[in-house]
Image (cartoon, rainbow, N blue to C red):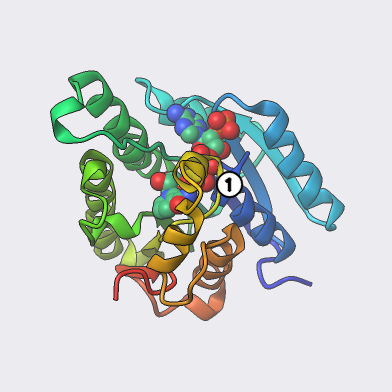
Amino acid sequence: MGVLAGRTALVTGASRGIGRGIAERLGRDGARVAVHYGRNEAAAKETVAAIEAAGGSAFTIGVELGLPGDAEALWKEFDRHADGLDILVNNAGIGSARPIGEIDEKEYDRVFAVNVKAPFFLVKHGLPRLRDGGRVINISSGLARTAAMPDNVAYAMTKGALDLLSRDLSKVLGPRNITVNSVAPGIIATDNTYELLHRSEGAWADAAALSALGRVGETADVADVVAFLASDAGRWVTGSWVDVTGGSLT
Ligand code: NDP
């Protein structure tokens, strides 16, 4: 029996990339997983199929984030499938790689709505469902703590804001024995980074060289850390910013 047997997890943005990796890992560890997606239902169903093929249990929830009422709509859909929650992973996010001179208000509002406002209200409206002893894990970014890619300023700002949510929420939820942490990946090969990693012949090698370990990260590199925090083994880690950049910040 897996270490998360009997627990229910919600992973936002679990149709693809890092979220899929996390959902599959938590499913393997025995959690029943709500696989959230925005538009790509087919990909979310593939995540569910992969979890089931490995002997786990999962279901999909499709709700576009970044729109008014998004969090309440998501929980309403969640409630149709499950009775309470143990692990909330705020993973869904979008990038913004334009320099400050080129970002307009629409793009700024959108990246904040998806990356900051949605997790904030998902937590707010999720609290009555989150059981004591639970976990909140917010997927941040190494860019919250490095200016290595200054054109990502708006995106980096969203992750900085998310980190403050993790920090302050850890105090709010500590009395209920709920831990709250940020997990900050470096460059991970996903759809999100495809352009960055393929924009020139040497782009992949350049990205790999940022890491002390000399390679580009894989979704499992992040999922394994999330699984640790989600498990009983992570019970004494809260209010923390976990560097999962493969040593890109040193
Ligand atoms: P991907 O683009 O590969 O996947 C994004 C996921 O989020 C998809 O499941 C997508 O759903 C969902 N999503 C995106 N926007 C919305 C929305 N508006 N409403 C609902 N769902 C949405 O991203 P990654 O896996 O690369 O990134 C995941 C997280 O990790 C993000 O928060 C990102 O900022 C962070 N991160 C990523 C890094 C990387 O190098 N890849 C590095 C550091 C942090 P659908 O399939 O339906 O579109």
Q: Could you say which quadrant of the image residue 30 lies in?
A: bottom right
Q: Which residue, given by chain and number where applicable, does mark 1 sit on?
A: 17
The residue type indicated by label 1 comes to Gly
Q: Does any atom of ligand 1 lie closer than 8 Å to the CB of label 1?
A: yes
For this orientation, the residue located farthest to the left is: 101
Q: Is residue 129 visible?
A: no
Question: How many numbered dots are placed on residues in this image?
Answer: 1
Q: Residue at x 57, y 62 (%)?
A: 223
In depth, the one of 75 and 53 nearer the eye is 53
Residue 123 on image: x %, y %: 38, 45
- In the picture, the quarter occupied by the N terminus is bottom right
In this rendered view, identify the residue nearer to me: 114 or 143.
143
Mark 1, secondary structure of its residue? helix
Q: Is residue 15 left or right of residue 239?
A: right
Label 1: how many residues lie within 10 Å, few (<14), some (14-19) or many (20+)? many
User: Among all residues in the image, which is located at the extreme front?
Assistant: 201
Tell me which corner region of the image, top left, top right, bottom left or bottom right, holds residue 228: bottom right
Residue 145 is situated, as x and y percent measured from the top left of the image, at: 23, 61
| Residue 232, image x, y percentages | 55, 76
* Residue visible at 50% across and 55% down in the picture: 204
